[in-house]
Amino acid sequence: MNRVMIADSKEKRAIWLRVIDLILPPRCAISGEIVPVQGTLSPEAWQSLRFIAVPFCACCGYPFEFETEKSSLCGPCLSEPPPFSTARAALAYDEASRNLILRFKHGDHLQLAPTLVPMMVRAGGEVISGADLVIPVPLHRWRLLSRRYNQAALLAIGIGKATGKAVLPDGLLRIRATLSQGHKGARDRAANVHNAFAVNPRRSVAGKTILLVDDVYTTGATVKECTEVLLKAGAKAVHVLAIARVVKSTDFS
């Protein structure tokens, strides 16, 4: 296909997108208001999101309510250090971000990926820069069949495109079907995902620094289990990046 044909194809696609927007105007995924571009948020919806910023735990990224030294750790990371090197999230998981994430995760609003990815890239700049490979938390094949897509894989691919990092969408496999983590305590979450993951035997992570991508960090049970598997397979280090994380006792998941 020559450059003229490629340009012509892109122009036709742009025209069709404009026609679709006229028939079905793009709407904010949170408020439902009409917005200029598909996948964007209204100003009010944007302001309702709680972005995580310093100060936070140097390890897991849990936000502190008061100023601390940059190297400060939260109580759980001091008492039981996680296997991953660092974890970061763009948003606090509350009612506003919950609605956004659930529409992306379960509501087929795939156009939200371009909205969420820049948030994650901004929040994870320090952990992205040193990564060799971007790998998403996988879905079991039966859940993937019913949902039709893995939201973490879409985010990982978007992060790879935005940063130039190599992506292994199938770097990890979920080899055992698990129950939903929703409404489970920390201990039950850990037990639920124990031995549920494996590194794809067709892929190698040996000596690589991995950026592990997930949607929501609650207790960290899933990403901790994935990290253990990656480290056992020879990964040099694992960093975690999520859209949002739970920052209070209320669990909306």
Image: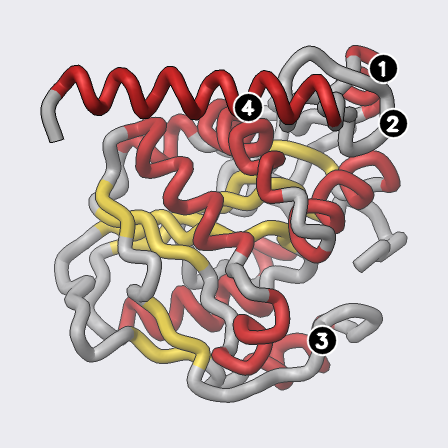
- Element under disc 3: loop
The residue that mark 1 highlights is 44
Residue that badge 2 annotates: 31
- Whether residue 235 sits left or right of residue 27 in the image: it is left
Q: Nearer the viewer, residue 92 or 148?
A: 148
N-term-proximal mark, 1 vs 2: 2
Q: Callout 3: 10 Å neighbours few (<14), some, many (20+)?
A: few
Dot 4 or dot 2: first in sequence order is 4
Between 123 and 160, the one lying in front of the other is 160
Instruction: Identify which residue is drawn at 50% across, 32% down.
Output: 117
Q: Which residue is mark 3?
A: 180
Q: Determine which of the numbered discs, if any, sits on residue 17 in the image.
A: 4
Residue type pointed to by label 3:
Ser
The secondary element bearing badge 1 is classed as helix
- Cα separation between marks 1 and 2: 8 Å
**Residue drawn at x 22%, y 23% as measured from the top left:** 6
Q: Amino acid at mark 1?
A: Glu
In the rendered image, the quadrant that contains the N terminus is top left
Q: Determine crowd level at label 2: few under 14, some 14-19, many 20+ residues with C-alpha closer than 10 A.
A: some
Q: Quadrant of residue 126?
A: top left
Q: Is residue 67 visible?
A: no
**Distance from label 4 to label 3 (Cα)?**
36 Å
